[in-house]
Every structure is written in C-alpha cells, then in structure tokens.
Amino acid sequence: MAAGRKLRNPFRGVSDIISEMNRMSDLMGGIDSGGSNIEQRPRGFADAWSPTTDIFAQGSDLVIRTELAGVAADDVEVTLSHGTLTIFGDRRVGAEQDNDFYVRERYSGQFRRDITLPPGVEDDDIDAQLREGVLQVTVRNASDAGGPAKIEVRK
C-alpha cells in the first residue's frame, strides 16, 4: 500500500443489523423485572444467537474470523449465495443441561451470520477452517474491493 493512501473499508455500512439487534436483545432478555432468570425458549432464525465476528484484510485476501467455541466442525455450514456468505450452525447442549445453573452466559442452539461479499466472489475463492473454536473463512483476492457506492438523491 502506498504511503498516505487511505484504505477503504468495503464493509462500511454493511453491518448485520439483525445480528446486532439480537445481541442487544440477548443482553436485555433472560431476566424478569424481579431479577430472576426466565426459562429460555428455543431460538429461531429471527432471534438466533450471533457469534462474534472479525472481518479484516490480510494482503489481498479478506479474512472472516468467527468465535465458535464448543461447536463441532460437523455442526457448521458455510455457504455462498448471490454474493452473501452465510455461516450457519448449532452449538449443542451437553449433559450439563439438566444442572441447576447459577450463571449461564454461553448460548446454545442455532446461529447464523450473513455477510455481504464484494462482487465477483466465486465459491472456489473461499476456504473455511475451524481450529480451536475459531472458524476462519478466507476469501482470496477480495480485500481490495471498493466500498459501497454512494447514490445521489435528487431533489
């Protein structure tokens, strides 16, 4: 990168608002007005827990890292459809489900993250590996894409 060249973030404005709303709901939910825990209901796509994700450039590649501690590789699916990368999976609850928890902060059940990729990305450009609880998805030659195009609003 040339000195003084400002790196454009191709994901500026592409934040997954649904995931962020779910995260806020998770922070507020689960406790009634008296401070007691409320039994958790099963989650669907609309309110699935959302694993934390980092997206960054590494050379000419775009790297997406998602924390999936406790999720088996067989329970994770990465797909590409119409320019959207979807990370879907399930953190299964083990035998400890029958225990009486004093604190339970780890979510279980299905999760989903949808990430819009730059135009022109094909499935052969993508590699995914799950190691030590972190899913790393590498999208080759996708970090130099321009940011979102600004559309003029006419008066």
Image (cartoon, rainbow, N blue to C red):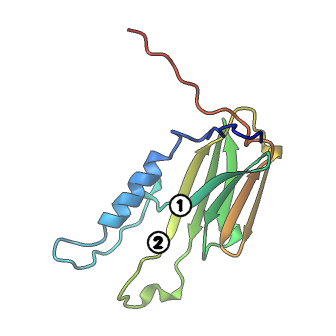
Task: Name the residue nearer the viewer: 97 or 129.
Answer: 129
| Residue 6 seen in this snapshot | yes
| Residue 46 seen in this snapshot | no
The residue sitting at the front extreme is 3
Where residue 85 appears, as percent x and y from the top left, is: 65, 46
Taking the image as shown, residue 67 lies to the left or right of residue 154, namely: right
Which labelled disc corresponds to residue 111?
A: 1
Which labelled disc corresponds to residue 149?
A: none
Q: Which kind of residue does numbered mark 1 sit on? A: Phe
Looking at the rendering, in which quadrant would you find the N terminus?
A: top right
Where residue 124 appears, as percent x and y from the top left, is: 83, 45
Where residue 128 appears, as percent x and y from the top left, is: 75, 58
Q: Secondary structure at mark 1?
A: strand
Residues at badges 1 and 2 in contact (C-beta under 8 Å)? Answer: yes
Read off the residue under disc 2.
Answer: 107
Displayed quadrant of residue 119: top right
Q: What distance separates the C-alpha of mark 1 from that of mark 2?
A: 9 Å
- At 16% from the left edge and 76% from the top edge, which residue is drawn? 34
Q: Secondary structure at mark 2?
A: loop
Q: Is residue 118 depicted above or below 40 in this figure?
A: above
Q: Which kind of residue does numbered mark 2 sit on? A: Tyr
The residue sitting at the left extreme is 34
Where residue 116 appears, as percent x and y from the top left, is: 61, 41
The residue sitting at the right extreme is 124
- At 58% from the left edge and 31% from the top edge, which residue is drawn? 148
- At 80% from the left edge and 46% from the top edge, which residue is drawn? 140
Task: Name the residue nearer the viewer: 91 or 6.
Answer: 6
Looking at the rendering, in which quadrant would you find the C terminus?
A: top left
Taking the image as shown, residue 113 lies to the left or right of residue 132, namely: left
